[in-house]
Image (cartoon, coloured by chain):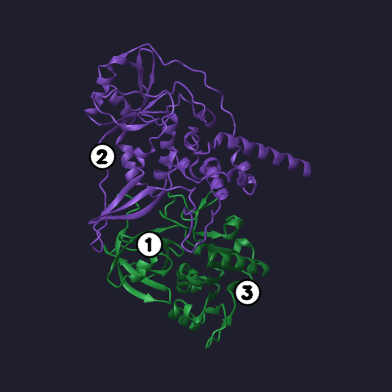
Chain colours: A green, B purple
């Protein structure tokens, strides 16, 4: 038994996928064969021994709940070390932590997913869940934006979603690029153009803070109440369990009271 | 439970402490340079108990500054193994009420959730706290303003007070009772002198009034001379923010938790460079509101015990009681101007 929650369990990388120039996905499973009991929106702490650990959203959970993935953008020291890791290497994992998206409360409603860049990672399990339980939901619409065609993540998923008649997919890139024949423009601008109405829908937004903020503005202009918009916030975290003290927004801890928040439940200065 | 007072004659103190070390590690206050802190008792070396505040809080005995949580061999791919839980019995003697209140708050942080910290729990379980009533309040002490008193015994296993003739001890829990069985402790009719302590003042606005001042200029004015050294957070008996890091020394590696401070620029800085608390003002506001507002939401009690250690350590002599008073003035002004407008 771990002496403290802070000591991770070993997990072996079973598949390493390069998603884009600076994003890789790591599929892994616990060495002791135990399951990852994460719900959409929850996160884990992943360690590279000797280099520390960092917080990542679970970006996919296999049906047997044994294999799970994180998708990692190369940003700092730890993510650089992770990007060097190859299949069969061992990392440490603890979690899942945090409050998940209340997908059960959304039954009967349409789901509007809006992701920007690596912000799509925590939203993919929501897409997976809604698509797998499609009879429970009144539709699934996805808007995903990336900087350029090369930065489009989860290309296999995007192709599959585009073919799925249950899913309405929109993709956009920030600036025009050769060979790109979908939308061009920042996510909030495209969200405004699309003008999806809030009628019996829930919007789920994740991306860089500025994108979340401006997308919320765009949605509100289309008549969305704050109670209909969910987001998952990023913050510097170390413990993931409400102790280390650095991820608070006022009295709320992003790791424990979030990372999933309904827009009306976070202070306006959080974004 | 609480037993009756027992008297330990002054000349028997050394023998009593020697007796205690037979069954446990004993920690007592020790003067180091200009300040007091806790140290292992050395038999034969006289012990003394300050009448009031021990400048270096006992926090580190329960939550060490640097605390290995696992060990690994840097050469192996994965060899992280959790450290053994400490189990040797330990007695901490002479903690004052404000320091013990700090432990009560830490209990909520580390044990009052779904992921109890087993290392902290082990430190708590192996420790018997023999607290000490203060016989004076220093100018920086303001525990009476924080719902505490120099006589408070909550959280202690036993308590003692220094008198003319020696020390009066009283057990408060079974753990405490076990320590006080020595024949050196005599039955007595004596009781510690009841002192009149200053009445508690409400120096700091109530949590909801404080939150009204979130966007006030006050924080800018109050923080412009703060050096952001983090001294206040390290001295505070309830500040427990920490970081997790891997450290390598040749063939040995340790994963540790180490004290961190919300006053440091890098504390909440994200890898992207985004920093929600970039300014001194934002960091001073975060600490102040955490002490006097957020802590009520998070753990049901204020995390300021009124010990004044932050004042004693501060290089610019920032006084939290004074800060509180200024905030109170600001809150009153705000109320008045609101009343005028509506």
- Closer to the camera, B144 or B172? B144
Chain to which mark 2 belongs? B
Q: Chain of mark 3?
A: A
The percent coordinates of residue B331 (x first, y second) are: 66, 40
Tell me if residue A47 comes above or below residue B37 in the rendering: below
Location of the C terminus of chain A (image quadrant): bottom right
Residue A235 vs B337, above or below: the answer is below
- What residue do we see at 31% from left, 37% from top? B125
In the picture, the disc for residue B87 is 2
Check disc 3 and report the residue beneath it: A189
Q: Quadrant of residue B18?
A: top left
Question: How busy is the neighbourhood of tag 2: few (under 14 within 10 Å), some, or many (20 plus)?
Answer: few
Report the front residue among A185 and A201.
A185
Question: Image point 53% across, 39% down: which residue?
Answer: B316
For the point 44% across and 38% down, the residue is: B235
Q: Is residue B184 left or right of residue A172?
A: left
Q: Which residue is label 1 attached to?
A: A37
Q: Residues within 10 Å of mark 3 (few under 14, many from 20)?
A: some
Spatial separation of the CA atoms under disc 3 and disc 2: 60 Å
x and y percent of residue B155 in the render? 40, 32
């Amino acid at each position: 038994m771990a002496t403290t929650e802070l000591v991770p369990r070993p997990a072996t990388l079973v598949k390493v996928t390069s998603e884009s120039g600076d994003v890789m996905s790591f599929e892994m499973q616990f060495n002791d064969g135990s399951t990852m009991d994460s719900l959409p929106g929850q996160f884990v702490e992943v360690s590279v021994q000797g280099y520390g650990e960092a917080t990542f959203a679970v970006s996919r959970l296999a049906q047997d709940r044994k294999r799970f993935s994180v998708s990692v953008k190369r940003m700092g020291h730890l993510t650089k070390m992770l990007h060097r890791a190859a299949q069969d290497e061992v990392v440490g994992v603890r979690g899942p932590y945090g409050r998940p998206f209340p997908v059960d409360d959304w039954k009967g409603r349409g789901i509007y997913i809006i992701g920007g860049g690596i912000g799509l990672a925590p939203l993919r399990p929501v897409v997976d869940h809604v698509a797998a339980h499609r009879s429970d939901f009144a539709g699934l619409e996805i808007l995903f934006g990336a900087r350029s065609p090369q930065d489009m993540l989860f290309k296999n998923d995007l192709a599959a979603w585009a073919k799925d008649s249950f899913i309405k997919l929109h993709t956009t890139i920030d600036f025009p690029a050769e060979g790109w024949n979908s939308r061009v423009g920042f996510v909030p601008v495209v969200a405004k153009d699309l003008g999806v109405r809030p009628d019996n829908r829930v919007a789920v937004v994740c991306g860089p803070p500025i994108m979340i903020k401006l997308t919320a503005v765009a949605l509100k202009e289309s008549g969305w109440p704050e109670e209909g918009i969910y987001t998952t916030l990023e913050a510097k975290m170390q413990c993931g369990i409400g102790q280390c003290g650095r991820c608070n927004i006022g009295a709320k801890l992003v790791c424990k009271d979030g990372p999933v928040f309904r827009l009306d439940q976070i202070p306006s200065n959080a974004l | 439970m609480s037993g009756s007072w027992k008297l330990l004659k002054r000349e028997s103190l050394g023998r009593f402490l020697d007796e205690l070390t037979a069954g446990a590690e004993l920690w007592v206050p020790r003067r180091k340079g200009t300040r007091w802190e806790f140290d292992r008792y050395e038999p034969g070396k006289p012990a003394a108990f300050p009448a009031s505040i021990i400048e270096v809080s006992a926090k580190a005995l329960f939550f060490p500054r640097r605390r290995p949580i696992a060990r690994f061999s840097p050469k192996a791919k994965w060899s992280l193994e959790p450290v053994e839980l400490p189990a040797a019995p330990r007695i901490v003697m002479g903690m004052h009420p404000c320091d013990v209140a700090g432990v009560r708050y830490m209990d909520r942080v580390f044990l009052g959730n779904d992921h109890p910290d087993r290392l902290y729990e082990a430190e708590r379980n192996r420790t018997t706290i023999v607290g000490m009533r203060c016989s004076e309040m220093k100018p920086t002490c303001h525990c009476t303003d924080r719902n505490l008193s120099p006589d408070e015994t909550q959280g202690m296993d036993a308590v003692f007070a220094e008198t003319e003739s020696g020390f009066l001890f009283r057990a408060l829990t079974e753990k405490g009772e076990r320590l006080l069985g020595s024949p050196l402790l005599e039955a007595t009719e004596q009781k510690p002198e009841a002192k009149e302590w200053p009445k508690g003042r409400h120096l700091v606005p109530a949590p909801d009034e404080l939150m009204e001042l979130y966007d006030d200029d006050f924080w800018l004015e109050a923080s412009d001379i703060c050096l952001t050294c983090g001294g206040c957070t390290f001295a505070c008996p309830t500040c427990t923010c920490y970081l997790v890091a891997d450290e390598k020394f040749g063939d040995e590696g340790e994963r540790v938790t180490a004290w961190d401070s919300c006053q440091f620029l890098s504390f909440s800085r994200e890898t992207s460079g985004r920093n929600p608390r970039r300014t001194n003002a934002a960091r001073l506001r975060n600490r102040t509101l955490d002490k006097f507002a957020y802590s009520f939401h998070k753990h049901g009690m204020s995390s300021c015990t009124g010990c004044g250690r932050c004042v004693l350590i501060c290089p610019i002599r920032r006084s939290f009681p004074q800060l509180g008073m200024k905030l109170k003035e600001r809150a009153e002004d705000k109320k008045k101007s609101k009343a005028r407008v509506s």
